[in-house]
Image (tube, rainbow, N blue to C red):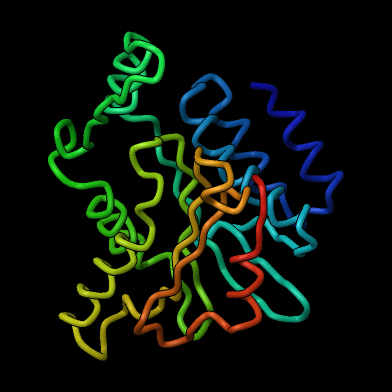
């Protein structure tokens, strides 16, 4: 992984104030897995930059995203490929052509459903969301086991917020975004999806929600 190329791409597309992020990448230069995970922030930034957003690299949360005069803060979470994905790939490789293959569930090797894991992450990240601002949690997923689970994760999160009550700090989160592996006619030729939360203290504006739902390819 060439860190300098990623940094150059961020500069070329106009990312703002990235030196702290660049230094963080260099600090983990010998740890390829950690660098790979941190590059999810660059991948996300480039997605928005290429879709005419203004992006500022920052810390806690990771990104300031601006579109047509409206600001939103994004916290990025990398999701690794899972053992379930590898087992599914092996099963499909061994199957005959046109044979249906039953895929597994991450609950078998992670002790919980994928949407439950994503909800737990959203709760754990609460301290990263800014009070009085529009906030989104952005999953950059390399696991096909999590594809199409975003709405379920948000529904699970909404249940937790309702249980916690009106004063819950979890209400700072206005929605979740997933950059996933799935791409094709069933997704409108987009691998980016967005789902708003129900009880956000600062709901994602209709303008930003419509842009986040537009067909995009990351």
Q: Is residue 92 above or below residue 11?
A: above
Quick one: 186 or 23, which is closer to the camera?
186
Q: Is residue 139 above or below residue 206?
A: above
Q: Where is the C terminus found, in terms of image quarters? A: top right
Q: Is residue 98 above or below residue 49?
A: above
Residue 202: x percent and y percent? 48, 86
Residue 38: x percent and y percent? 54, 39
Total numbered labels placed on residues in the image: 0
- The residue drawn where x is 28% and y is 19% is 87
Q: Is residue 16 left or right of residue 33?
A: right
Residue 29: x percent and y percent? 58, 24
- The residue drawn where x is 83% and y is 49% is 13
Residue 215: quarter of image? bottom right
Q: Where is the N terminus found, in terms of image quarters? A: top right
Please identify the residue farthest to the front as the structure is shown. 98
- The residue drawn where x is 64% and y is 39% is 23
Please identify the residue farthest to the bottom as the structure is shown. 166
- The residue drawn where x is 50% and y is 72% is 135
Quick one: 145 or 96, which is closer to the camera?
96
Residue 64: x percent and y percent? 64, 66
Q: Is residue 162 above or below residue 78?
A: below
Q: Is residue 45 left or right of residue 15?
A: left
Please identify the residue farthest to the right as the structure is shown. 12
Residue 85: quarter of image? top left
């Amino acid at each position: 992984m060439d860190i300098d190329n990623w940094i150059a791409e961020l500069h070329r597309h106009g990312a703002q104030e990235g030196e702290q992020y660049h230094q963080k990448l260099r600090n983990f230069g010998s740890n390829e897995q950690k660098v790979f995970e941190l590059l999810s922030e660059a991948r996300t930034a480039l997605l928005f930059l290429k879709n005419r957003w203004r992006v500022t690299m920052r810390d806690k949360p990771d990104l300031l995203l601006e579109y047509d005069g409206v600001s939103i803060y994004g916290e990025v979470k990398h999701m690794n490929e899972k053992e379930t994905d590898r087992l599914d790939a092996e099963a499909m490789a061994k199957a005959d052509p046109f044979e249906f293959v039953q895929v597994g569930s991450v609950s078998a090797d992670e002790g919980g459903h994928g949407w439950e894991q994503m909800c737990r992450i959203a709760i754990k990240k609460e301290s990263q969301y800014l009070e009085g601002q529009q906030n989104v949690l952005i999953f950059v997923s390399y696991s096909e086991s999590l594809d199409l689970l975003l709405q379920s994760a948000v529904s699970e999160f909404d249940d937790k917020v309702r249980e916690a009550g009106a004063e819950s700090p979890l209400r700072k989160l206005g929605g979740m975004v997933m950059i996933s592996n799935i791409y094709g006619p069933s997704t409108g030729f987009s691998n980016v999806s967005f789902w708003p939360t129900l009880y956000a203290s600062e709901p994602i504006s209709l303008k930003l929600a419509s842009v986040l739902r537009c067909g995009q390819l990351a």
